[in-house]
Amino acid sequence: MTGKRRTSTRSTFLPRSFRFTRSVRATALSAGALAACASLAVSCGVVPGVSGGSGDDPIVVMTWAPEETSATNKPGMPAFAVAYARWINANGGLNGRKLKVLTCNDHNDTVSAAACARRAVKEHAVAVVGSYSQHSDAFFPHLEGAGIPYIGGYGVTNAEFTSPLSYPVNGGQPSLLAGLGKELGTTCGPVSLVRPDTIAGDALPPMLNAGLTAGGHDKAEDQRAPEDATEYATQAEAALDNATGDSAADPKGCVVTALGDRTATFMDSFRRTREDHPGIRTGTVLGSVDQTVINAAGAASGPFEGAYVTGWYPVSSDPAWAPMKKVISEEAFSDTRIDPTDTGVQTTWIAYTVFRQAVESLDGGEVSADSVRGALDDGLKVTTGGLTPTLRWEFTDQLASIGFPRLVNAEVTLQAVRKGRLVAAKKGFVDVTKTLEKADVD
C-alpha cells in the first residue's frame, strides 16, 4: 500500500508461526548492528538505535511526516510531537529524564523516507512515534535492521500491520473502509469508490467491498484518480454516472472518496458536476475529511451534508480529548499547523501515550529500543482514556489470514455531517474484525 506504481513489490507478510522471541530479537539486533555499521560507517561500540543511554541523557525518539508536497501533507504530526516534548519535559520528563524529539520530512517519496529512517538509526532513536509515510518499503528495513520500534504509525501501509516492529494504535484505512462499507451497504444504491491510482490505493477496494458485502450490497465501482491532481471533473462525472443506477426507480447511490488531502479538491469538481445527478450522497473516511474541510466545502449547503464518515476515534468535541487539548493550549496554542481535529495530530497524541506508558513500565531501568519493544511485546496493556479500546500487541491469527497479523484495534466510530457539523452518528465503537476477515485480498 505504498507510493507510486512499480512492476513488483516486496512482500511484508509474515507467516502465522512467526514469533519475535527474546532469542530471535537478540540475534536480529546483532545482525542489524553489523548491517547498520557497514552502511552508515559509524562506530560499532554501540548498536545504533538500541542504546538510548542512561542516567541524565535525554530519551531520543523521532516523528516524521510529509510536508509541503503536492499530495497528502501532515505537518501537524511532527509539530505536535515537539510540543508534546516541551510539555512532558516541563512536567518532570519520562521517569525523570528529558524527552528529545527529532523530526523529519519524508516528502512523500522513497528517498526521503529512507533518509529519515537512517537518521533515526544514526542518532540512536529508541522509537519512531506517531508518524505518517506511504513508503514502508523504504523505511522499515532500516528500522528493522536496528531494532527500532515504529509506534502509532498513521496506518496507511500494509507493512504497519505485518512488521514485528510495528505497534499500530488504529486499524488504518482497512478498518475505516470496512466500517463505512458496512453502513452504506444498507442505505445506498450503486456505490462508486474514488481512490488514488497508487499501490496504496489498490488495497482499498477489497476493504470497502468487505463492508458492503456484510451489508448485503454489491461491490463498489472502482474509480482510480491521480493523488496529486488539481481538478477531478472527469473522475467526478464517472463516479456520479456509476452511482446513478439504471433507472429512476433504483435507490440513490453513493460516492465514496478516499483521496487524503485531495478529497477537498475532488469535492470542488463533484459539487459542480453533481447538479445533473440529484440525490447522490457521499461517504468518506477521517483523514480525507475533517470539520475544516466540511466548512470549506460549504458546510450545511455543501456536498458533505448527510455524509457518513468513519473514524478511528471519538469526535473531536468528546471530553476524552481534553488532555491533548491541554498540551496544545500550554505549548502550541499559536502553532497553526496543529489542529486538534486532525486525525494525524490525534494519532500522534495516542502514539506518545503508548510510548510514555512503555517507558514508565520500565521502572527507571534502561530505556532503549530493545527495552521499549520488550515492554510492548511482553503483554503491556495501554489505556488511552477512552480514545481507543485497551491496546495490547501480539501476533494473532485472527486477521493474519488477510495479511494483517499486527492489527490489534479494528474498532471504528461512525460519524455523520448534520447541519454542517461532524457529529457522532452512533455511540461508542463498532468492531469490524469479522468484516475484515471476509475481505477478498487476492
Image: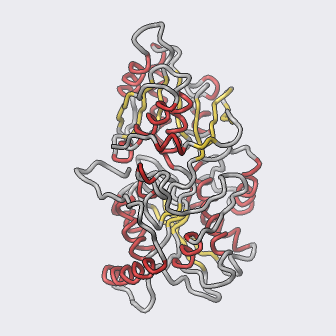
Point 64% across, 56% down: residue: 335
- Which is more toward the observer, 273 or 311? 311
| The furthest residue to the left | 7
- Which is more toward the observer, 233 or 222? 222
Point 60% across, 68% down: residue: 379
**Which image quadrant is residue 201 in?**
top left
Q: Position of residue 372 (x, y in %)?
A: 57, 75
**Which image quadrant is residue 163 in?**
bottom left
| The furthest residue to the bottom | 45
Rendered position, 361 above or below 68: below
- Which is more toward the observer, 64 or 334? 64
Rendered position, 275 above or below 206: above
Q: Position of residue 116 (x, y in %)?
A: 42, 68
Q: How many labels, in total?
A: 0
**Figure quadrant of the C terminus:** top left
| Residue 228 at least partly seen | no
Q: Position of residue 263 (x, y in %)?
A: 48, 36
Q: Position of residue 366 (x, y in %)?
A: 60, 84
